[in-house]
Image (cartoon, grey):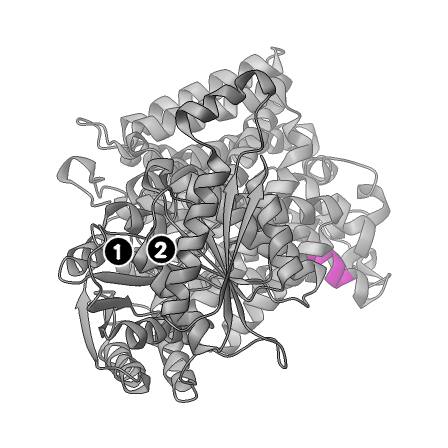
Amino acid sequence: MKNTIGKKLKRNVSFLSAVSVSMGTMIGAGIFVLPGIAMAKAGSGAIISFAIAGFVALTTALSASELVSGMPKAGGSYHIINRSLGPALGSVAGWGSWVGLVLKGSFAVVGFAYYFAVFAPVSITITAVVAIIFLAFINILGAKESGMAQVLIVASLLIILSVFTGWGLSEVNFSYYEPFIPYGWGSVFAVAGLVFVSYVGLIKILAIAEEIESPRETIPKAIILSTVLIIVLYVLIMFVVAGVAPHGFFAKTDTPVVDAARIFMGNTGMAVLVFAGLLATISTGNAVILCSPRYLFAMGRDGLLPEWLSEVHERFHTPYKSILVTAGAMILLVIFVDVMGLVKLGSAFNLIIFGLINISVMLIRHNKPLWFKPSFRSPGYPFVQILGLFSSLALVPAMGLMPTIVCVLFFVGGLGWYYLWRDRTENKSVASDISRTIKTKMALWKANGFADGLENEKDGESYKVLLLLRGSKFNKNLISIACSIAKRNKGTILAVKVVEPSPPKIFRFLRTVFGSGSRRADKMLVQVERHCQKMGVGAEGKAISTHISKRRILEVIKEESCNLIITEHIEELGKIETLENVLGWIMQHAFCDVVVFKDGGGKKIKNMLVSTPIGPYAEFTVSVANTVAEFLGAKITFFRVINPRANKEEVKTIEEYQKKLASNCSVFADVAARKSLKLVDEIVRETEKFDLLVISASGDWVFKSIVFGSISDEVVERVKSSVIVIRRGIPKHISWLRRVRYTIWRPSKFDW
């Protein structure tokens, strides 16, 4: 969906505010809790663990800086991954990032409420809810106001922590560092995975890229500076904590930094550090409510969420509805859910996002899209990105089984959401550009080995076509198509007509009025047999009496060892009934190929349009089209709708591919192409000049196909001429895993 003037965000966040937002998402309750846990597992070696985790985070910071300097839009990691790897993974990143941030923000405000209770004993839940409402109000007023508040909070926090580390460095006892690595280097790396959660907020500043002044220059500097400062700060805090008392002392406490301050700063210092914890948690909460609504805003603007989420306040220029939804979600979590136990689950998913960001850099560097002109380039390419990718993904299982499971659920849920909403969004990603180019090149390579005509899949046995008669009238074009395929393969036709079983005796008198269904079926079958014989094809008629037609048809296919089933599209039954409920069910269980024919009025077929297929079954589609054209004496035109984003190499490859298909045909064949994003509209418009359209059935999720219909369904619904829809059957010998895949995903594999 295109953005409008009313939906533009205002650029009023300064460099200092950007640095504060970035640091605010990292300086949270974690640094006040994790040192004790880390020292219990790695001793003084936890200092190195924080440094290692920071170095890994810095690799992603460099990658994120390059990407955002080339596409500074709202939505952060969602927008970057959407434009790089496609809207499917973008949806995963968007939903996962938003949920993870909401969990982290809820955790932060609950932590704030606990710290606040030290100074004023009030209800934890009420304090947390009031804090969320207050922060939401500030963020609705404007990103500039929220950024200014963040600057004050982070500045105060840094002053307190700087005093703590400066004073603490003069109080350390180096004997407490011995042995420096008491539990071996394995514990150091394991703890690095544990404390990595302290750095996952570094990329959240990307979410407000559309509101930062001079984003191409400001954001890379802000990300790198804030990351380096946080690494130094964390390492110094760990150095002080480890040096003022034996590591066993802090292993028994949940507030190691506060306890360390009490050792060398007294009770006053402890109170100041408690206040610092209060600032850290409210800083994280503010940063979350500032950044997370931008994911909803960007996804709403792109069509992956309801459009109203992308509405901007006319006066304040903020995505106020997304902010309200985010604040509402946080309030519900605070009231009804134990967010303390859930925050780690959300943080684990950020590691997946880190990996995808590093992949995005490598993909864009390889493809070099013309629209991507970054002002900053990551040094050490591609080693920095490879290190960031593998280290991020390796740390996911280190966080435990449950976080790993949650990551998988986020991934599957995001993909499922995209496939339900993808008709409303456009794939402008670099990955789609590369994928189209690769597919066309592979298709051209395979076209060189195309055989002329259909192959008999059952060596040594006769080829048999099952002609399923679903209409009440004799259709010459349907019979001719069936005969052309059977004759080409030296096979025969088995014509089947399904009739309802005999009614109860009390209703049998109606036969004398309206006639018998079985008699009409027998008459039609005889007519089909005679017509086939005139065309030189052996045919046999068979009437089936059953209520459950699709199961009985499957039994006939198996009993008669049919290679292909051809049937007609009945307009009055609707696309769902014809293509999905009956033939869709057969395709999930039968081993034969399927051809569906829709008659456009009985017009004689002389000119055929073939929607050029690209995929593993292209040869089959072209062979069917060529066979029918040769039998009917018709001409073929291969037509391809090309994505407007296609580069010259892709367009040239498609042209060569279509010419190769035309040269493989035994009849006259021409080629045509047109650039457009409106695939169905272009096919329907082009079909007006032809008597018959040949298309391959589009693959899709079963649930989505039933609810919304597929591309081929829409084409069949709209075109006025005759149509052939082709779908290949399931191979006979496939693993159970692939059979599950065929059950939930239509097995066409065609790229439209």
Secondary structure beneath label 2: strand
Q: Residue furthest top?
A: 122
Q: CA distance from mark 2 to mark 1?
A: 7 Å
Secondary structure beneath label 1: strand
- The percent coordinates of residue 372 (x first, y second) are 27, 67
Residue type, mark 1 in image: Ser
The one of 561 and 707 positioned closer to us in this rendering: 561
- The percent coordinates of residue 539 (x first, y second) are 49, 64
Quarter of the figure that contains the C terminus: bottom left
- The percent coordinates of residue 375 (x first, y second) are 28, 67
Above or below — where is 344 with respect to 494? Answer: above
The answer to whether one can see residue 457 in this image is yes
Residue 475 is marked as none
Above or below — where is 191 with respect to 96? Answer: below
Give the residue displayed 35% in from the left and 48% down from the top: 713
Give the residue displayed 41% in from the left and 20% down from the top: 134
- The percent coordinates of residue 328 (x first, y second) are 46, 22
The one of 660 and 341 positioned closer to us in this rendering: 660
The one of 684 and 146 positioned closer to us in this rendering: 684
Q: Residues within 10 Å of mark 2 (few under 14, many from 20)?
A: many
Residue type, mark 2 in image: Phe
**Which residue is the site of mark 2?**
597
The answer to whether one can see residue 165 in this image is no
Give the residue displayed 55% in from the left and 51% down from the top: 586
**Which residue is the site of mark 1?**
722
Where are the magenta residues, as a range? 188-193
Disc 2, disc 1: CB below 8 Å?
Answer: yes
